Image (cartoon, coloured by chain):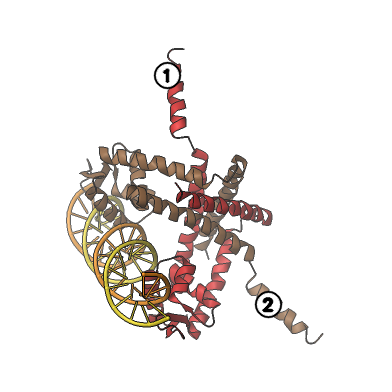
Chain colours: A brown, B red, C orange, D yellow
Amino acid sequence: MDDVAPVLDAETKALEAHADHKAELRLWLRLLTCATMAEAEIRRRLRERFGVTLPRFDLLAQLERADEGMTLGEVSRRMMVSNGNVTGLVDRLVESGHIERFAAPNDRRAQMIRLTDPGRADFRRMAEAHEDWIADFFAGLSAAEIERLMGLLGRTKASLRSAIARRNTK
Amino acid sequence: MDDVAPVLDAETKALEAHADHKAELRLWLRLLTCATMAEAEIRRRLRERFGVTLPRFDLLAQLERADEGMTLGEVSRRMMVSNGNVTGLVDRLVESGHIERFAAPNDRRAQMIRLTDPGRADFRRMAEAHEDWIADFFAGLSAAEIERLMGLLGRTKASLRSAIARRNTK
DNA sequence: CAAGATTGACCCATCAATCTTG
DNA sequence: CAAGATTGATGGGTCAATCTTG
């Protein structure tokens, strides 16, 4: 017994200091793989078939249902990216003719942007193809499986929110 | 009836040309949100607590169980990023002292890299914290839920693979 | 010629600093 | 001083071109 006890103690100690969480780690890697595979394929197809990048597509999507246009700050908040990032994206989308800048009424600090007519037409084609691609990505799942996955990912999202909120209090 | 039929026809036509796939689209957005939230939080914590970026952490992780080192090409394939990208990452990790370059035996074209001793020690601390963070992210799910999610994501991954394979044949 | 690595052009992302306006 | 936008430094990603070596 003398030669066994130290090993058990070491394992117990390790378990207290740093418990094993292989199941969660494997789940995270699988979730990440699915998201990365799909996103890479979307980028590839947007580039190949429409000559556009995903961030540009995302910005156009934000703009599509804002007929009056939006300020750059609003785009930045909705896309959850930095202010400076939006400035550069907007520069390039103005350059390509998809959107146009105009001054905000009532606030001389703010720039607003909106889709041009060709920009809107171009985006509609892309959005339609995009929706078809996504449907194809999940074509191997039944409607019931899609439903269950939605539910579990909803629970995951809530769990993530809590964990991220906990961060700032430790 | 005369005023109803045209509407039905229009809907039928739209359905044929471009079926509606809202459930899949919502599922994709939710999956993407989960992955993005978790990844952003991991980047934030790696930066705040260890002063390291996620790509650097990923490269160190690839290297950890290759005591003999790896070629840059092998790292590139495993991380699924381009060759040129790896060159830059390696430059910065050599600069910070985490890894070292050496010439491959038997092939004078190839560069190899391996962890330095301090690099390995640093990575071990990060990896342990990383595993704890992930466990915390999924703390709101039961073991059974984790199991079901793993299964559904496995099916999703398979569906994605098929869809991506289908791409090149259309 | 093909494969390993590097380089340069470009895009996307962050942050910190700055300028203008409320 | 706050907030909206821009700029510059830095890091990470792609691709195409190049150089060396198998």
Q: Residue at x 47, y 73 (%)?
A: B74
Q: Is residue B98 visible?
A: no
Direction top: furthest residue: B1
Where residue A28 appears, x then y in whole percent?
56, 60
Where residue A127 appears, x then y in whole percent?
39, 42
Identify which residue, A133 or B57, lies in the foreground.
A133
- Which label number is shown at residue A13? 2
Identify which residue, A90 or A45, lies in the foreground.
A45
Where residue A62 appears, x then y in whole percent?
36, 44
Q: Is residue B21 visible?
A: yes
Say which chain tag 2 marks: A
Quadrant in the picture for the N terminus of chain A: bottom right
- Which label number is shown at residue B123? none
Instruction: Specify the amino acid type for callout 2.
Output: Lys
Q: Which residue is mark 1?
A: B6
Q: Residue at x 57, y 53 (%)?
A: B158
Say which chain tag 1 marks: B
Q: Are marks 2 and 1 on the same chain?
A: no
Instruction: Determine contact: label 2, label 1, CB under 8 Å.
Output: no
Side of A63 where B138 appears, left or right: right
Side of B86 where A13 appears, left or right: right
Vertical relation: A18 (above or below) A86: below
Instruction: Specify the amino acid type for callout 1.
Output: Pro
Identify which residue, C10 or A23, lies in the foreground.
C10
Q: Identify the secondary structure beneath mark 2.
A: helix
Quick one: label 2, few (<14), some, or many (20+) residues within 10 Å? few
Vertical relation: A17 (above or below) A43: below
Q: Identify the secondary structure beneath mark 1.
A: helix
Quick one: label 1, few (<14), some, or many (20+) residues within 10 Å? few
Q: Residue at x 54, y 59 (%)?
A: A163
Question: Looking at the image, is mark 2 or mark 1 nearer the viewer?
Answer: 1
Give the CA distance from mark 2 to mark 1: 74 Å
